[in-house]
Image (cartoon, rainbow, N blue to C red):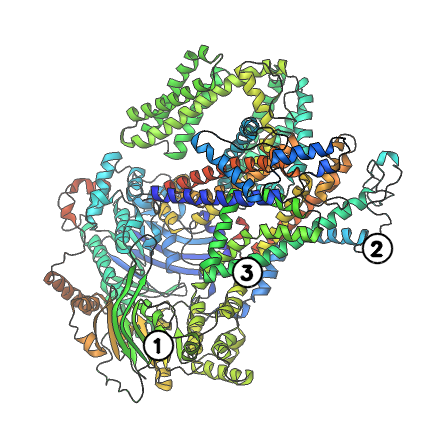
Amino acid sequence: MTTVENSTPQPIDDGTVLSFSGLDVKFNTEFGKVHAVKGISLEVRPGEVLALVGESGSGKSVTSTSALGLLPRNATVNGAINVAGNSVDTMGDRALRKMRGDDVAMVFQEPMTALNPVLSVRTQMVEALELHGKAYGKAADARAIELLAMVGIPDPEKRLYQYPHEFSGGQRQRIVIAMALSCDPKVIIADEPTTALDVTVQAEILDLLRSLKDELNTGILLITHSMGVVADMADRVAVMYKGDIVEQGTAREVLTQPQHDYTKRLLDAVPRLGSRGETAPVVQGEGPKALEVNDLVVEYHRQGKEPFRAVDSVSLSVKRGEIVGLVGESGSGKSTIARCALGLIPAASGEVAILGEDITKMRRKPLKALRKRVGVVFQDPASSLNPRLPVGDCIAEPMDVHKIGTSKSRRDKVAELLDAVELPRDVANRYPHELSGGQRQRVSIARALSLDPELLVADEPTSALDVSVQASVLKMFTHLQEQYNFGCLFVSHDLAVIDMLADHVVVLKDGKVVEQGARHQVLADPQQEYTKRLLMAAPVPDPEEQRQRRLERYDFMKEIGEEDHGLHLDEAPDRKDLMGGSAGGEGQMPPGVSGGN
Amino acid sequence: MTRYILRRLAISFGVLLVGSFLMYILTINSGDPLEDLRQSTANNREVLIEGRIATMGLDNPWYERYWDWLTGVAGCFTGNCDLGTDRSGTDVLSMLGQSASATLRLVTIATFAAIIIGIIVGILTAIRQYSGFDYVVTFLTFLFFSLPVFWAAVLLKEYGAIRFNDWIADPQISPLQAVIVGVVLGFILQGVMGGPMKRRLFTAGSTAAFAIIALLYFTYVGWWRSPALGPVIVILVSVAFAVGLTALISGLGNRKVLYSTLATVAVGSVLYFALDPLLEEPNWWLLFGLLASAVVVGLVAGYFLGGYSRGQAMGLAAVTAVFMAGMTFTDHLVYAWGGFLELKSRPISTIGASTPNFQGDFWETTLDWGTQLILPSILLTLVSVATYSRYTRSSMLETMNQDYVRTARSKGLSERTVITKHAFRNALIPITTIVALDFAALIGGAVITETVFGWRGMGAMFREGLANVDPDPVMAFFLVTGTAAVIMNLLADLAYASLDPRIRR
Amino acid sequence: MSEDRRDSAMQGSPEPLPHAGSEIDDPQFTDKSYSQGQLVRRRFFRHKGAIAGLAVLIFITLLAFTSIGIGGISGWWDKDFTSTGTVLNGGKPTIGWFYLGEHPFGQDSTGRDYFARVMRGTQVSLIIAFVVGIASTMIGTVIGAVAGYFRGWAESLLMRVTDLFIIIPLLVFAAVLGRIAGDSGIFVFALVLAAVTWTGLARLVRGEVLSLREREFVSAARAIGTGNWRIILRHILPNTVGVIIVATTFAIASAILLETALSYLGFGVQPPDISLGSLISEYQTAFTSRPWLFWFPGVFILAIALSVNFIGDGLRDAFDPRQGKDG
């Protein structure tokens, strides 16, 4: 390679664009040494997607970061890392920088923070081009516009000069991908590229990434925790667990015939759409409904602008003993409805009746009495418990507030609730930071149940948890619901979770109800286009089935007249320029690309 | 954006009004304005008391007195200012003329010096986190935070001024002193530059050697009393600046920018000689004009040589031009030092804002100003430098942890570009707020500093006015410093908006 | 963990480091974990500057209050700070390495014992600094918490007063108030100072409360019907304790500088009482003839302010290691 100075004299060229052999990473921390990666070996070939799968803390991101030589100083790295035939561990600073962007590029998880907010998109795109000598000045601008067009940013000539905050999350991720593409790297490392995105946007971004490997023959190391994404994208899969690779093979082998226990457990834990079949609808007994929302409108006031209507005339109801799944993408207003039902934010109009009483017009005293009969579980395990209170006090807090029972009876109740959420009793004396995320969500559920509520509002209670933890929490949740028989408004973005749990489903979009009905009816036979889109975009963890679904989705998109989301190479007129960066690269030309240098 | 600025101005104006009311009421109620006369033993005591009551309008109710003052100030908008009189009947506006300029000069210099030094030190300590340099600076900032300004001022007067004046009468540096200074300098610089041991040793060694030789040489040729830079040094330093600036901002790989800045230096060098006669006895207007034309030279050079990165080339060339103009200015100042010493044998002043009856040419007068200003400015700057450097450091460390910095690194940008282009701009955003908030504290510091150095500035007006329960001088102080603070805030707002596209509209 | 984050500032940090155990549902480190209090103590005692500061502050406080006594209780030093006497040996200090002598810090021109004067000045300055620190913390915490939680009038008040202090220097405002209250005794004077120095802390508390009230445990508390004051007292303020303690410490450090500066200008503690600031003002012209009259009070101010600042730094490291030495 001409691009790398002072590297090893003999580049190893075995056809891989990225390889790790015996990679071993340790961190020195305040609490001692942490062995993050324990001697793993991986390789990525051109035009191939290798998915690195694992739950949080398995060491997968550490692995990928080591390929760029960007690990923090307190890391000790052993083993060999090879990028495009050059050994990363022996490279000097200059060569390392030359390699970054040029040979290997990175796409990060959080598109909202991955772009510098104070620099225009042009500045951020052009600097990489100029740095690696691909194009300068006007030519670089033109190239940047071309790249934006390729990744499907509309009106790129104008938008190039805008700032990141003027783009949506999905568009920002496209820009990050365009930046990654700008120097025509041999391999792209995508670290959870779709985790922060909605499921429909995720499908689009995955389409884009897939066309990269097909059309540009780029190798992709895809880091993800989602088995659905793996099934959708990967050629090969490596499963990582506690810093080790426990299983490696083709996507089909690993996903359909897992060998290692951990892989099996992981796959079993993945909630699957349509696995529950038809169930009988819940029949409401005597008395008012647990929750009834009629024509609810919620508005957020913004300074100097029109108020933003987050929820627009929504009606729904939750019977006692019924779980209603409220599903939608970010910004659909689902959490707003949940918070409004809890009386945390005021309604602009409409009514919210809990157990038959309209809380929008209620005085403080009776409202407090009513709240005794409502429980709540929020999303974020890190912030849902007061860090200054021991777990036992957290659970007893509702009883304390409503002055129920003696301190002895409260202690007994806490013990009983801890048993119910399958936590050891001595957890009561621990502080929340001593517990794991899943344990904290269990504590939240115990707290919500402490007053035997008739209505429970759960706002994405498992979406911050790893899939195996999510499975056990959901299982317990269903069990508790049967036992305590509360009505539940369950908010989630994950259709499969809703499918597992709910009796009735409400689909939201932009603050409006798109479709609602019995679970099986809505999810198995959706009537509305948006519901169909949502369902089609959700990937399933079986490569063959997912391929089928993908094709169906393409057909559907054609039907409704939407363009596809792959690379728009035809919109990049000067193909020669595009391929100019790979001068002296591998001879293998990606299929479907004519011209080249 | 304009609406935002106007709104801010309106709020500031309202606060100024409320503040003036509060200050006025509190001041006139802070004591007995006749106290000194009541205790006086003069025969015409009663007459004096009557007279003061008349001049100060003490028999009017407070709201009338405030209203009188307010309408007088409102007159400033129509061209006939009336800021009232002090208790002896002197017009406050005329007093203000001399004192305001001295104080504002002091505060402005201290503010900008503190911003520049504080930010640079803050960035360096952030980059060299947990190095010896970082620890030393951390300790020093704590020291400056804890320093009673009035006490430090007396020390500075003693050691900074009186000892220096003694020394400059017969400037000698012994080899031992030179070695000590050199070694200390070398040690500091290696801490700042960092790097592996070998490079540090080299940095320290070469710095020390250079400093020792320079000090001994200067002493030998009597440079301290009749110094000069000369064209060679001016041009060499400017070239070094041009190259350094280019390397820092756009990288030496960008030849277009490098040639633009170097061309600017070349033009500047020609002008250095061409303008020499003009600069014999200039005035400030001429100098401002020359500075403006220097900027134009830079912009033109950047425009024609910048090519694909024209914008950046123009900016950097203009900065280079300003630097070179500054060097030329310094060159003339330094040259005038010998003559200045003839006029004023003890150069650093400890009392007053200007030497009484000082007669000298333009350069000597400027030097006189400078020597008056230097100690109070140093003092005032130190405290603010401590604040700004701490703040910059934490702000930098915060931004260096952001995702977009990681993105920038993953593109292969050098550490230098990552810091100057990606981290620094973001780190500056919160700093603008602090600068605005800190400005009032700086004025407060100026009151103390002026007292110690015996300036007849705004601080003295305030202090004496308050001691005498004499509202008009106190209010004049409030008016001037308050307006300055409002302007400073406006600048900070503008800086904020230009840094952060999210609030720009 | 937080140490690492800081270290990694230069290199870009990858995903949160996996120190908390590899599989989320079985934290390996549970046995090793420390309670909040233990962690704070451990971090504080590792901060050498803070320990040194604490030692110096305790020493100075003990020295000042036991030597000449306070409030009628006499101390171990036999001279007081007002009686004049004959000037011995030009009033030079007699202090040596292991003995104090007749006049350890010397005498002023009227023969008053300067050690007793400096001790009294230290007492006054310390009392004022602590009263200001604590009183302004209380005002600031209440206003900040109310402003942050209820927004509304308290927030407007806070913002407008902040605007005021952007325009009027604190020192100037305090000087005017000190001119009014300076001779009503040191406690009144201290409370007056507290009445103008609470804004910084109030802003800080408000910011903390604003972010805490969006946390889910506060929403959960509200959803189950917890009253507003109970939420503030039980759920919000305990989580701001660290910030408040740290801010109080720094408030004490700046209070001592503010008080001495005011006393120096003549708008603070009024004679016959003395503070370290008024001592410097009184004797600054004596710098060339009797430098010790100038040196001792200044060194005491510096030592107190510096040690309090270091303690504050140590507390900040202890309570919020992420913020670290960076504020």
Q: Are marks 1 and 2 on the same chain?
A: no
Question: Can residue B195 be seen in the rendering of this structure?
Answer: no
Q: Is residue B276 left or right of residue C248?
A: left
Query: What's the residue type where badge 1 is placed?
Result: Leu
Element carrying mark 3:
helix
Give the mark nearest the N terminus, 2 or 3.
Answer: 2
The chain under label 3 reads C
x and y, in percent, of residue A138 in the image: 23, 35
x and y, in percent, of residue B340 in the image: 59, 15
Query: What's the residue type where badge 3 is placed?
Result: Val
Residue ID for mark 1: A474
Residue ID for mark 3: C142
Query: What's the residue type where badge 2 is placed?
Result: Ser
Q: Is residue A110 left or right of residue A504?
A: right
- Which label was assigned to residue C74? 2
Between the C-alphas of marks 1 and 3, the distance is 42 Å
x and y, in percent, of residue A572 in the image: 16, 44
Mark 1 or 3: in front is 3
- Residue placed farthest to the left in the image? A559
Between the C-alphas of marks 2 and 3, the distance is 38 Å
Q: Marks 3 and 2: in contact by CB < 8 Å?
A: no
Element carrying mark 2:
loop
